[in-house]
Image (cartoon, rainbow, N blue to C red):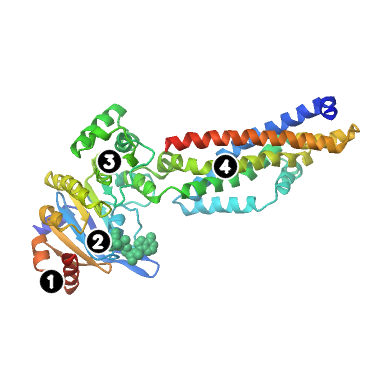
Amino acid sequence: MTTDAQATALVDVDRVNKHFGQLHVLQDINLKVSKGEVVVVIGPSGSGKSTLCRAINRLETIDGGTIKIDGKLLPAEGRDLARLRADVGMVFQSFNLFAHKTILENVTLGPIKVKGMKKDEAEKQAMMLLERVGVASQAGKLPAQLSGGQQQRVAIARALAMKPKVMLFDEPTSALDPEMINEVLDVMVQLAKEGMTMIVVTHEMGFARKAADRVVFMADGQIVEDAQPEEFFTNPKSDRAKDFLSKILTH
Amino acid sequence: MNTLLNNLDLFTTGFQNTLILFFFSAIFALILGTIVAAMRVSPVPAMRAAGTFYVNTVRNTPLTLVLFFFALGYPKLGLPEISFMTAAIVGLSLYTATYVAEAIRSGINTVPVGQAEAARAIGLPFSQSLRLIVLPQAFRAVIPPMFSVFIALLKNTTVAAGFSVAEAGAIRANLSERGEPAMAGLLWVALVFVVLVFLLSLLQRYFENKWKVAR
Ligand SMILES: Nc1ncnc2c1ncn2[C@@H]1O[C@H](COP(=O)(O)OP(=O)(O)OP(=O)(O)O)[C@@H](O)[C@H]1O
Ligand SMILES: [Mg+2]
């Protein structure tokens, strides 16, 4: 199964290294995610989780190694990169909805400008997606008029509108008030059930248990463990992971 | 008052030329300045370097030297001949564009980086994320410094007088030739400038209110 999965890896991160000045943030990172797989990335603050996500859709450059999406090497800056980025949906911790555009425009902008979709077609698709994430009634509002949970669900719809091959989530619920976390996680669980390939940085163990196929534990720029969720949470192998889990479990 | 009425011809051509200089220089400076600002935030290092070089050299050159070059240096280069007026517009545009570029760049810096990252993440190339996402949000922050730049430009048009363009600043010299009291002429010129600057400020307030709602 593993060799088969590696042959068809949708996301293939191979010996990737990245420095911020002296700091070696990503150290020989290898990560393969096959189609339909949901991988949760977990680890202490500063371990490089965000940097890894950002490297995968090239918001951050890398110093060494290769990253392939569906077999294609990420190109350098330019139009080719922009096109390939559309294959990778990204959901940010701080939502980052376009502040001067309505909810509907946030979701139609990419399909119209990047994919050349007709406006009415893009709007129809957007309304379907907004319906799916439960914010269709807010379509005419500006992002600032929505709650955090609603904004994040719109951000998911915006990413889905590009029909990405893989979705990256960087702590999608950690900027939310507790009562809004579940409405976002529910959308993500649903997405996972529908077969979306996902890489999710999160400390929500409920989500990891419910939806993840694998948990990857990162510490100090390295992948320390890569295991099934149940196995990782009940029986972590490394001291780093044990230490980390004991900390987040007591909170 | 007599100084004004008896020499209305001088005043009208003078301010007409001032407004022509101002209008064309403002438009060209706005276009060029926007391009230079885009270069300065571009992902391509060579573009950034070129933009920075342009801003730093031209902005640190006194305006008189820039105009001096176009009025006196340029004709010696054997390039197509241009009128003093055109030369003054080119000089003023190139000079003012550096200030426009810096005003826009400071406006761009007020837009959270997450906006541009989200734009890139959905596959918009740099030019479109700038044009569709970042610049519209930067405009509001840009308006006050931009109007300062335009007010400075309006006043800078008088420098062109020294280079044979008969704009408002030249009125006083022409008045002296006609034997009019220099002081009165000067005061009238100053008064009209105050009125023009006031009109610009009104326009600024209009734009600030307009963009406030759009936000
Ligand atoms: N643009 C940057 N310039 C310099 N250092 C950076 C930059 N971005 C991140 N870092 C550093 O790189 C390290 C890894 O950062 P990263 O954001 O990837 O960690 P993380 O695992 O996502 O942490 P958190 O859980 O706090 O989000 C940190 O030490 C951080 O300070
Ligand atoms: Mg992070």
Question: Relative to A153, is B109 on the left or the right?
Answer: right
Element type at mark 1: loop
Same subunit, labels 3 and 2: the answer reads: yes
Task: Inspect the image, locate mark 2, and give the three-letter code of the amino acid beneath it.
Answer: Asp
Whether the residue carrying mark 2 lies under 8 Å from ligand 1 is answered with: no
Looking at the picture, does residue B134 appear above or below residue A54?
Answer: above
Element type at mark 2: strand
Q: Which residue is mark 3?
A: A158
Separation (CA) of disc 1 from disc 4: 60 Å
Looking at the picture, does residue A172 appear above or below residue A114?
Answer: below
Residue A199: image location, x then y, percent: 21, 54
Label whose residue precedes the other's in the sequence (3 or 2): 2
Q: Which residue is mark 2?
A: A14
Q: Are marks 2 and 4 in contact (CB under 8 Å)?
A: no
Task: Inspect the image, locate mark 4, and give the three-letter code of the amino acid beneath it.
Answer: Met
Pointer 2 chain: A
- Towards the viewer: B40 or A49: A49
Element type at mark 4: helix
Q: Between label 1 and label 2, give the one nearer the viewer.
A: 1
Residue A145: image location, x then y, percent: 32, 39
Q: Which mark is residue A237?
A: 1
Q: Which residue is mark 4?
A: B146
Question: Relative to B150, is A54 on the left or the right?
Answer: left
Residue at the image point whose x is 17% and y is 45% from the top: A187
Separation (CA) of disc 1 from disc 3: 38 Å
Pointer 1 chain: A
Residue at the image point whose x is 81% and y is 37% from the top: B186
- Towards the viewer: B90 or B191: B191
The quarter in which the N terminus of chain B is drawn is top right
Task: Inspect the image, locate mark 1, and give the three-letter code of the amino acid beneath it.
Answer: Lys
